[in-house]
């Protein structure tokens, strides 16, 4: 009977030790989940910032192209005015 009691106490001790270890893992998983959420938020913010920067660069390029078109249009209007003056002056 002594060996059986010793075996049962040993099994019970191992079971309790395993349960305590599982609680530690549960606690660690909760901490990891929070860290993962924080990391996901930071990654989302970084992606949004990169997209905003890319859109800002694209807007700057479009504004520069529009300015070039305005300057070219002004040049064409000046040439057309000169041509009209030359034709009307004849």
Image: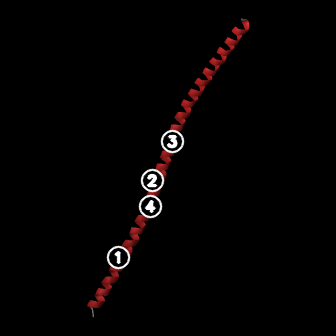
Q: Which label belongs to residue 38?
A: none
Which is more N-terminal, label 3 or label 1?
3
Q: Of the residues tagged 4 and 1, which is closer to the observer?
A: 4
Q: Which label belongs to residue 40?
A: 3
Q: Position of residue 18 (x, y in %)?
A: 63, 21
Which is more N-terminal, label 1 or label 4?
4
Q: Where is residue 68 in the image (x, y as percent from the top left)?
A: 41, 71
Badge 2 crowding class, 10 Å Cα cut-off, few under 14, some 14 to 19, many 20 or more, is: few
The residue that mark 1 highlights is: 74
Secondary structure state at the residue bearing disc 2 = helix
The residue that mark 4 highlights is: 58
The answer to which of 50 and 85 lies nearer the viewer is 50
Left or right: 46 in relation to 2:
left
The image quadrant that residue 9 belongs to is: top right
Q: Where 35 sits versus 15, above or below?
A: below
Where's the C terminus, which quadrant?
bottom left
Toward the bottom, the furthest residue is 90
Which is more N-terminal, label 2 or label 1?
2
Secondary structure state at the residue bearing disc 4 = helix
Q: Position of residue 34 (x, y in %)?
A: 52, 34
CA distance for labels 1 and 3: 51 Å
The colour scheme used here is secondary structure
Where's the N terminus, which quadrant?
top right
């Amino acid at each position: 009977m002594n060996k059986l009691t010793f075996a049962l106490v040993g099994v019970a001790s191992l079971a309790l030790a395993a349960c305590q270890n599982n609680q530690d893992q549960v606690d660690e998983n909760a901490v990891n989940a929070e860290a993962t959420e924080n990391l996901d938020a930071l990654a989302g913010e970084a992606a949004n910032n990169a997209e905003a920067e890319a859109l800002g660069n694209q807007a700057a390029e479009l504004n520069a192209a529009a300015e070039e078109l305005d300057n070219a249009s002004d040049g064409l209007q000046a040439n057309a005015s000169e041509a009209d003056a030359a034709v009307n002056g004849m």
